[in-house]
Image (cartoon, rainbow, N blue to C red):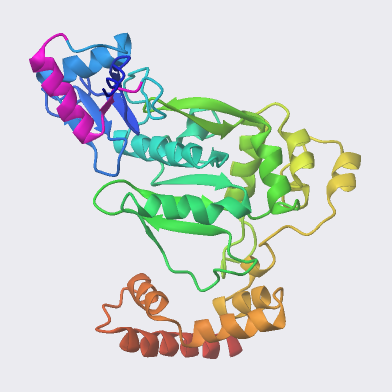
């Protein structure tokens, strides 16, 4: 005699992200709930009976099906990855809010990234983006991508998790070097670009120490029913100010507009001066902190070498990349230099796309890339 299977404790709503869009003019009038399933898939909307049942799972779950008809609905929802008979499911949704961001799909990308990180035990912090607007640090609300920061040893794992959902990692010739600080993930059929950072350029602290310092001064915000971590306003102001004044290859000296933007963000968050000292941001923000910190404090913390700063200020790509290469061991320099001269197929084709060159083959892309590089070298020598 076999034992009976244990009865379900009741059904609950699950998803990688969920939003109540019943009042949104971005969707058809019958659309009520925008969902991203708990298993790899694309967002879709619930309407009618399905929406009503799912709302009950959110607000009143765990629930037992009232009849066979409801049981069939729940079975169908389980197949879609939006309901589960397990009340402890890690993707359980217990609240349903209207969109917080102007782009609901952008909000789902935040929720998904946070879910994937949590499933793998990866602590992460979301930087820049709409949170700056909500914290009163910038006027613009929307951003075109999602920026997530985690410890250096976890970046590849989070990037790999995103590939299972349709994102593609952009090839980068600097991958495997200390210069490489971001994995750029481009979306498939839905979503936005997601940048997985191992560091924020411009800080003096070691990458892991800088992340730990920011993560230790973070706060939760709910996007699409999922709690995500963002820096507190005083910390976020420092990171955004550093980003605002970062040098761009060939752009010359820091502009007055960039400096004014950074100074305004720092002034808008009480305590940002102290956080700049703790994060090792004083060397790159010395001018912008002049009105917030005593001169003696600025002198005390102005030492150190900011990561990824000097080479970014070079007048052209050739000199910028050469300066960056000089920071690497000899064996790495040789490997990366060859990767720039005659790159593998994926890097060659990515370079062609960025140059607006519809190359017919990787070999053609390599030759055209080499020609562009030689023109840059001649320009730099002049």
Secondary structure character of the magenta stretch overall: helix
Q: Classify the position of the C terminus by image quarter.
A: bottom right
Whether residue 203 sits left or right of residue 250 in the image: it is right
Region of the chain picked out in magenta, as a range:
66-86
Q: Work out which residue is located at the far left of the displayed protein and give it.
A: 69
Residue found 54% across the figure and 86% down from its top: 338
Q: Is residue 267 magenta?
A: no
Indicate the position of residue 172 as horizontal and vertical percent values.
48, 69
- Quarter assignment of residue 367: bottom left
Q: Work out which residue is located at the far front of the displayed protein and give it.
A: 1
- Quarter assignment of residue 308: bottom right
- Quarter assignment of residue 65: top left
Whether residue 304 sits left or right of residue 200 in the image: it is right
Residue found 85% across the figure and 46% down from its top: 301
Residue found 26% across the figure and 22% down from its top: 1
- The number of callouts visible is 0
151 w.r.t. 333: above or below: above
Indicate the position of residue 109 as horizontal and vertical percent values.
37, 40
Whether residue 149 sits left or right of residue 330 in the image: it is left
Q: Nearer the viewer, residue 380 or 282?
A: 282
Whether residue 305 sits left or right of residue 332 in the image: it is right
Camera sees residue 268: no
């Amino acid at each position: 005699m076999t034992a009976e299977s244990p009865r379900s404790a009741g059904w609950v709503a699950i998803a990688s992200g969920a939003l109540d869009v019943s009042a949104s003019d971005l969707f058809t009038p019958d659309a009520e709930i925008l969902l991203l399933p708990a298993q790899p898939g694309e967002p879709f909307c619930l309407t009618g009976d399905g929406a009503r049942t799912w709302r009950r799972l959110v607000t009143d779950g765990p629930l037992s099906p009232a009849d066979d008809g409801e049981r069939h609905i729940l079975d169908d929802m389980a197949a879609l990855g939006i309901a589960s008979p397990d009340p402890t499911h890690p993707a359980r949704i217990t609240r349903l809010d209207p969109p917080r961001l102007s782009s609901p799909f952008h909000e789902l990308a935040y929720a998904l990234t946070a879910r994937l990180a949590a499933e793998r035990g990866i602590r992460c912090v979301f930087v820049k983006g709409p949170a700056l607007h909500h914290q009163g640090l910038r006027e613009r609300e929307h951003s075109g991508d999602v920026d997530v920061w985690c410890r250096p040893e976890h970046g590849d794992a989070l990037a790999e998790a995103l590939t299972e959902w349709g994102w593609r990692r952009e090839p980068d010739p600097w991958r495997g070097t200390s210069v490489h600080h971001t994995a750029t993930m481009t979306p498939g059929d839905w979503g936005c670009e997601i940048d997985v950072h191992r560091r924020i350029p411009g800080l003096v602290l070691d990458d892991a120490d800088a992340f730990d310092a920011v993560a230790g001064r973070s706060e939760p915000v709910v996007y699409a029913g999922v709690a995500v971590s963002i820096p507190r306003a005083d910390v976020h102001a420092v990171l955004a100010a550093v980003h605002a004044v970062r040098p761009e290859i060939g752009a010359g000296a820091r502009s007055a507009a960039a400096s004014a933007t950074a100074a305004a963000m720092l002034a808008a968050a009480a305590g940002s001066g102290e956080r700049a000292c703790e994060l090792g941001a004083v060397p790159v923000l010395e001018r912008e902190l002049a009105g917030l910190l005593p001169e003696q404090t600025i002198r005390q913390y102005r030492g150190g070498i900011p990561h990824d700063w000097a080479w970014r200020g070079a007048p052209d790509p050739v000199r910028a990349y050469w300066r960056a290469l000089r920071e690497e061991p000899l064996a790495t320099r040789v490997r990366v230099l060859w990767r720039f001269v005659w790159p593998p197929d994926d890097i060659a084709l990515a370079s062609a796309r960025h140059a607006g060159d519809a190359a017919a083959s990787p070999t053609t892309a390599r030759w055209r890339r080499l020609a562009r590089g030689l023109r840059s070298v001649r320009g730099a020598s002049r």
